Amino acid sequence: MKRSRINEIMRSADDFVRSFGFTLPPFAYWTPDQFRKFRGEASGIIQSRLGWDITDFGGNDFDAFGLFLFTLRNGDAADLAKGRGMLYAEKLLICRTGQMTPMHRHNIKAEDIINRGGGRAIFELNMSDADGNIDNDADVVVRTDGMERRLPAGGRLRLGPGESVTLLPGVWHRFWADDSDVLLGEVSTVNDDFTDNVFAGNIGRFSEIEEDEGPLHLLVSDYDRLLAG
């Protein structure tokens, strides 16, 4: 993705989020120079990968095959083994009309995905077989706002504003906006986007960036490279 396109997506995403009464945290609006200035105090932000996350999943067509995310909070995976500490994460996501998030599952993360407003979100769901691959035969059982739902393999779940679905580890899912753009919330177990995403097919989690202009704000994938030293 071109950096200029990422900057454009950031601006429009901020407007969209604000239209629903949400405001991103102050560090969201730091310039790269401000981030470098505060990187000592901001070690928790950097280590937990809080912040802007915009990906085309390596396909170079964000409008058709991409996702906007902002990680608001995230705990430490090491605490999971202890069973205590900050064991949760929270994100905001934006699904644009005509834009697909590819089929994937998680090894560890359980997540509630909540329609915070806009149109309907559609989720296509499959269970995992014994080897962790997509099971094209087994019924899918999930909870939506605490109520058990059963769908056939590959069934589609439609969530309107205010509705949510709980996706446990191993449940394959892809999702998109139905009739208009959707603001989604995600509340989950500690999030690790480097090791816990399993995609169907050869898909990359983060984008390759063409630096055609300077960054408006840093992405979480920029931290290692642009905040080193």
Image (cartoon, rainbow, N blue to C red):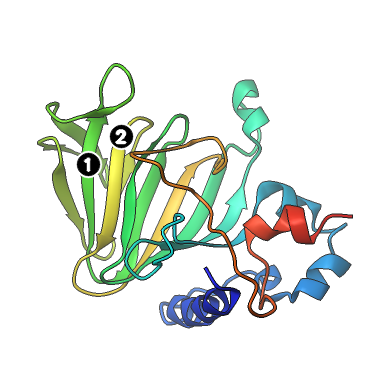
Identify the image quadrant of residue 146.
top left
- Residue 111 % position (x, y): 41, 42
Label 1 belongs to which residue? 125
Q: Name the residue under label 2.
A: 171
**Res 163 visible:** no
Q: Which residue is drawn at 80% across and 52% down?
A: 43
Q: Residue at x 54, y 44 (%)?
A: 193
Report the amino acid beneath label 2: Val
Q: How crowded is mark 2: few (under 14 residues within 10 Å), some or many (20 or more)?
A: many
Q: Which residue is drawn at 53% across and 53% down?
A: 206
Near mark 1 (Cα within 10 A), the count class, few <14, some 14-19 or many ≥20, is many
Q: Residue 59 carries which label?
A: none
**Image quarter of residue 213:** bottom right
Residue 1, given in percent of the width and then of the height, sits at 52, 68
Q: Which residue is outermost to the top?
A: 130
Q: Which residue is drawn at 81% across and 73% down?
A: 34
Q: What element carries label 1?
A: strand
Question: Which three-letter amino acid code belongs to the residue tagged 1?
Answer: Leu
Residue 95 vs 49, above or below: the answer is: below
Classify the position of the C terminus by image quarter. bottom right
Q: Is residue 150 left or right of residue 186?
A: left
